[in-house]
Every structure is written in C-alpha cells, then in structure tokens.
Amino acid sequence: MKKTTCKNLRGACDAEIQGATAEEMGENSKKHVMEMVNSGDEAHKAAMESMMQLSQEDQHKWYEDFKQGFNALPEA
Ligand SMILES: [Zn+2]
C-alpha cells in the first residue's frame, strides 16, 4: 500500500490518499475530491475544474506520469 497527499494528485489539501495500485489510488483520490466538492469545498471544486480544463492528451500524460511515479511513493 502506497500513500500520497491530495495535493500531489492535483487536489487542494494535505489529506492522505492511499492505494495498493495507481488505479486504486486514483479512484480514492477522485472519491475524496468528490466528497469535498459535495460538501461545498471551493478549493477542491477549483482543483477539479482545473483538471477538467486539461486536454484529454494532457490528462492522459498526467496519469502516465503519476503511474510511473507510483512505485517511488512512500509506503502507507
Ligand atoms: Zn483534498
């Protein structure tokens, strides 16, 4: 299990996000951001909007970089 922070995943806070795989971590991060957005958090809303403004290509590139860096993340 690896860990990182919401901020490192283009989020807006220092909440810890864990995952056994890059995919799982991505899902957990999305869940966290959605929860924050649903509770009315403007910072996470802005972070989500900035991610959605990236082109498909840039989003894909970001995700590839994230997957490549996954193994270097600290153990949870
Ligand atoms: Zn967060």
Image: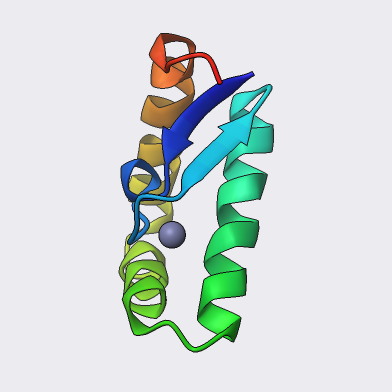
Residue at x 34%, y 68% (from the top left corner): 47
Count of numbered circles in the view? 0
Q: Is residue 17 above or below residue 70?
A: below
Q: Position of residue 30 (x, y in %)?
A: 59, 57
Q: Position of residue 41 (x, y in %)?
A: 43, 82
Q: Position of residue 65 (x, y in %)?
A: 37, 27
Q: Is residue 45 above or below residue 15?
A: below
Residue at x 42%, y 17% (from the top left corner): 73
26 vs 58, left or right, is right
Q: The N terminus lies in which quarter of the figure?
A: top right
Residue at x 37%, y 37% (from the top left corner): 61
Find ligand 1 in the image and state its quadrant.
bottom left
Residue at x 64%, y 47% (from the top left corner): 28
In depth, the one of 50 and 21 nearer the eye is 21
Q: Is residue 12 above or below residue 34?
A: above
Of all residues, the one furthest to the bottom in this rendering is 40
Q: Position of residue 14 (x, y in %)?
A: 35, 50
67 vs 69, left or right, is right
Q: The C terminus lies in which quarter of the figure?
A: top right
39 vs 46, left or right, is right
**Colour pattern of the rendering:** rainbow
In depth, the one of 63 and 47 nearer the eye is 47
